[in-house]
Amino acid sequence: MKTLYFDCFNGASGDMITGALLDAGAPFDALQAALESLGVPGFHVSREKVSKQGVGATQFHVHIDSSEKPHRHLRHILEIIEGGDLAQPVREASAETFRRIAESEAEIHQSTLEKVHFHEVGAIDSIVDVISAHVCLHVLAPERIIVSPIHVGTGTVQCDHGLMPVPAPATALLMRGAPVYASDVEAELLTPTGAALLTQIADGYGPMPEMTVEAVGYGSGQRDLPGRPNVLRVMTGRTAAESAPTQTILVVETTLDDMNPELYPALAAELFKQGAVDVFMTPVTGKKGRPAHVVTALCPPAQRDAVTQAFLQCSTTLGVRMREERRVCLERQWETVLTPWGEVRVKTGRLGGNEIKRAPEYEDCAKRAEAAGIPVLAVYQAAWAAIAGGGQADA
C-alpha cells in the first residue's frame, strides 16, 4: 500500500506541506497549471531550495501584489475553487478544508458559516496553499496518510483580532481528535491552515509505520528558529497492503446512579466539545440495586485532561476510570453529493485502497431537512439516490 507519513516535529503550515510534497516528488509544472486555471489575477508561485539549520528543503512561495484584499467570505473562496480546472477530488477536498475552517471560526465567534469573515486565511496566499497541497496529494496519490503527533509551539501570536495564545483559537478547534504537544519553543509552529489540512487528510496518527521508504521530502517554513530546522518532513513508501491504520484511543468512563437524566445530553455535548470522538451510555445495576449508567467517552490521549474535567464538572461523579486501547480504522474519504435541498457530505470507508462502505453524513441531512421543513428520512434517501446516481438526485 502506498503510504505517506508526515513527521510534524516542528509543526506545519500550508506552504510547508506543499513544499514537502514538492520535495518528495510532486511535479511543480502540474501544480502551476492547476493554479493558473483558477483565473485569479495578482499572484504567481515559485519554489526554491533553501537550507534550514543544515537541512536542505523546498520553500514554496506565493507572490501577491499589494492590492490583494484578504477579507473574504466562504462563498467567495468556494467560487474561486469552483472556477478552476481542477480534478474533482482536488476541488472537493479544497472546499472541505475551507468549510472546516469556517465551522471553527463560526464556533469561536458564535456566528454562522454564511457570516464568517475570513481574515488571514482568506488571503489569496492561504487559498493557494490549500489548493496546492491538495493538488500535490492528488498527483502523488497515496492510499494511506499517517500523521505524527503535532508540535504546536507555545507563547502568543498576533492575529487580526489581536494577541492570541498559541495554538490560536481556530487551530485549537481544528485539532480536536488529533495528538498534539507543546515545548519551550515560543512560536506558532502550527497554523490554522496546517491544522485544517493535516486533520482532514490523516487516516491515522502515531509513529512512522513499518514501511519501505521510497522518497523523503522537506518543506521549509518562512522563519528561522534558533537551534532547530523550521521544516516539515514527509516520507513516502510502501506498507503491507492488508494493513489498516491503527490508533491509540483513551477510554474514560464513570458510573452514575444519582444524576438527573435530563442532564445526560448536556454532559455528552460537553464531552464532545472537549475532544471526545465518541460518547455512549450503558444502563447497569449499581450498588444497593440502584439503576445506573456507565458513561463512556473515547478520546485521543492528548485530550485526557479536558475530557476528565468535563466529567468532573458536568456530572455528579467524584472520579473517573481510564485506560488506553488500540483501534483499527478504515481509511476515510469525504465527497459531496447534491440533493434537491442542497449538498450533503458522504463518508467513504476504504481498506487497502478498496471501497468498503459509504454513507451520507447524518448531521448534514438533519440540517437540510430542518431548513426545508421536511423529514430527515427524505433527505437521507435522496442522498443515497445521489450516491447511486453519481452525485445528484432528482427532485
Image: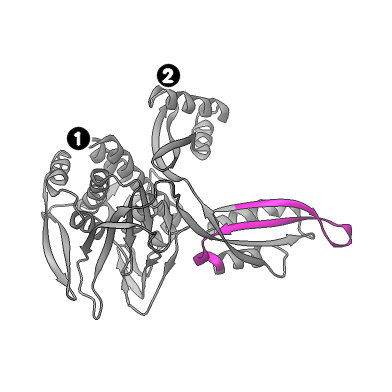
Residue 286 lies, in percent from the top left, at 82, 59
For the residue pair 56 and 389, the one nearer the viewer reads as 56
Q: In front of the other: label 1 or label 2?
A: 1
Tell me if residue 315 can be seen.
yes
Q: Is residue 101 visible?
A: no
Q: Please give the name of the residue rendered at 31% of the width and 47% of the height, measured from the top-left corner.
A: 142
SS state under label 2: loop
Amino acid type at mark 1: Asp
Front-most of residues 19 and 318: 19
Q: Earlier in the sequence, mark 1 or mark 2?
A: 1
The residue located at (36%, 44%) in the rendering is 96
Magenta span contains residue 212: no
Return the x and y of residue 239 as percentages of the image width and height. 36, 52
Q: Please state the horizontal and vertical placement of residue 299, each as a whole percent of the image.
A: 55, 59
Residue 166, picture quadrant: bottom left
Q: Where are the magenta residues, as a range?
A: 279-304
Magenta segment includes 302: yes
By secondary structure, the bulk of the magenta-drawn segment is best described as strand
Residue depicted at 26% across the width and 43% down the height:
138
- Secondary structure state at the residue bearing disc 1: loop
Q: Give me the disc on residue 115.
A: none
How many numbered marks have been drawn onto this rendered protein structure? 2
Q: Are marks 1 and 2 in contact (CB under 8 Å)?
A: no
Which residue in the protein does label 1 denote?
85
Q: What percent of the width, then of the height, locates residue 216?
A: 24, 60
Amino acid type, residue under disc 2 in the picture = Asp
**Residue linked to disc 2:** 394
Q: Few, some or many C-alpha atoms within 10 Å of disc 2 (few <14, some 14-19, many ≥20)?
A: few
In the displayed structure, would residue 181 be above or below residue 281? below
